[in-house]
Amino acid sequence: MGWLFLKVLLAGVSFLGCLYPLVDFCFSGETRGQKPNFVIILADDMGWGDLGANWAETKDTVNLDKMAAEGMRFVDFHAAASTCSPSRASLLTGRLGLRHGVTHNFAVTSVGGLPLNETTLAEVLKQAGYVTAMIGKWHLGHHGSYHPNFRGFDYYFGIPYSHDMGCTDTPGYNLPPCPACPPGDRSSSASGRPFLLYVGLAHMHVPLSRTQLSADPRSQRPYGAGLREMDSLVGQIKDKVDRIAKENTFLWFTGDNGPWAQKCELAGSVGPFTGSWQSHQGGSPAKQTTWEGGHRVPALAYWPGRIPVNVTSTALLSVLDIFPTVVALAGASLPQGRHFDGLDASKVLFGGSQTGHRVLFHPNSGAAGEYGELQTVRLEHYKAFYITGGAKACDGSTGPEQHHEPPLIFNLENDVAEGVPLERGSAEYQRVLPKVREVLADVLRDIADDNISRADYTQDPSVIPCCNPYQVACRCHATEQTDFSTSRNIWK
């Protein structure tokens, strides 16, 4: 049991004016017998088909494809919501938005964030003896106690929201001026302690810009260039893990939700999930919706010597499962007095099981219906929609809101593109319908009996982060820039 140093190097790759740190893990001494380290990497708005291992038409993810060949790839893995804040809250709590209270995105002027009575994965692991760090996009509140440093993370370096919000402006313009954070100790160390590193990438969220990574003509397409840059960043993290802590580090890569509609010029690929039914209704079949393109995301698990290599799992799993799985592997305990929607996926990861959830619920994330409403039910290979429409397409149009009672039901085993719903009078539909209604009623009763939270979505211009050093929410002071060409909205 030697020394573990989790050192974050602020050597960045320029992308959209943001600086991405590279992570350096330095060990001395023996690591065997320690609790495992965890690296969780969350891509932003990455389509299922953006991963080359999922979709042969994609050629931009050589590092991720290598990770898939050396680990486990999940083809039926889902975000807990179809937009940023709710999905990230579910990753860190293992609970649906109707439980943890985050049902839609926070704004740059939001006073609140992830409710303070919710326990995060970082808090659980910190209590179990872990060093915890978070790098990148947070989007769960920045004001006061909602900041990551008050939510279980020993170290934080990143942006509070998306890079298209607040004073993280067009690269090079710096409008309004964002004062630099004062320099501080950028390392976290402890004796013999394992670590949790959570990396929230800004890739592949818009706006996109060209990078300097490659002279390949394909780099002229902004989305492909950004995808290759993201892939390179993940590859650097994986390479460092391989050199230093290969046998004792579990790396989990996935996405927060699907991309914008595929017909958008700068959108990612949802692969085969562009069926005729939703396309004919207008609007978007991807982000914010409960169609497969909105929440089915790429996912990889990598742990040499523990997770079998080159395995494709068809188990029905979710971002919700990261919390209970990591807690179990860390030998920690789930928080008491609340119910969880995720499951421990250890049997899938290590035991060869192809059995995950029997049921998943997909909440409304900004399309038709109430925020957080469980309007879509996945039951085995069936999927039932009670509400569709209401999401904006790239051309600005919005699909008509439609309520379905009884619900639309698709058989994903035969129709993964959700192109043709089952005939309501068919024997198959009549057999599935009561089961769908039963599981939906069960979860709503369970939520009603649970210890639930409500997020504060109050907005106040005075809490805009780091755009005005005289406001109480801005803890940074203007200092001379040394290594960076522009001052950015980077919080520590």
Image (cartoon, rainbow, N blue to C red):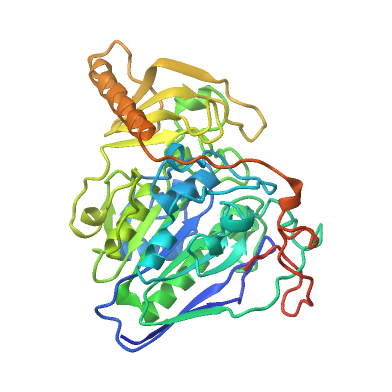
Task: From this view, report whether residue 378 is shown above or below residue 115.
Answer: above
Number of labels in the image equals 0
Horizontal and vertical percent position of residue 159: 63, 60
Horizontal and vertical percent position of residue 124: 38, 61
Locate the C terminus and report the quarter of the image it occupies. bottom right
Task: From this view, report whether residue 185 is shown above or below residue 120.
Answer: below
Horizontal and vertical percent position of residue 365: 52, 36
Compare residues 358 and 207 and report the one nearer the observer.
358
Residue at (50% x, 70% y) in the render? 154
Name the outermost residue toward the top: 425
Residue at (26% x, 34% y) in the render? 380
Compare residues 104 and 260 and report the one nearer the observer.
104
Tell me if 406 is positioned left or right of 108 in this view. left
Horizontal and vertical percent position of residue 213: 60, 69
Locate the N terminus and report the quarter of the image it occupies. bottom left
Residue at (33% x, 27% y) in the render? 440
Compare residues 416 and 11 and report the one nearer the observer.
11
Tell me if 234 is positioned left or right of 400 in this view. left
One can see residue 411 in this view: no
Task: From this view, report whether residue 180 is shown above or below residue 347.
Answer: below
- Residue 392: image quadrant is top right
Task: From this view, report whether residue 130 is shown above or below residue 393.
Answer: below
One can see residue 490 in this view: yes
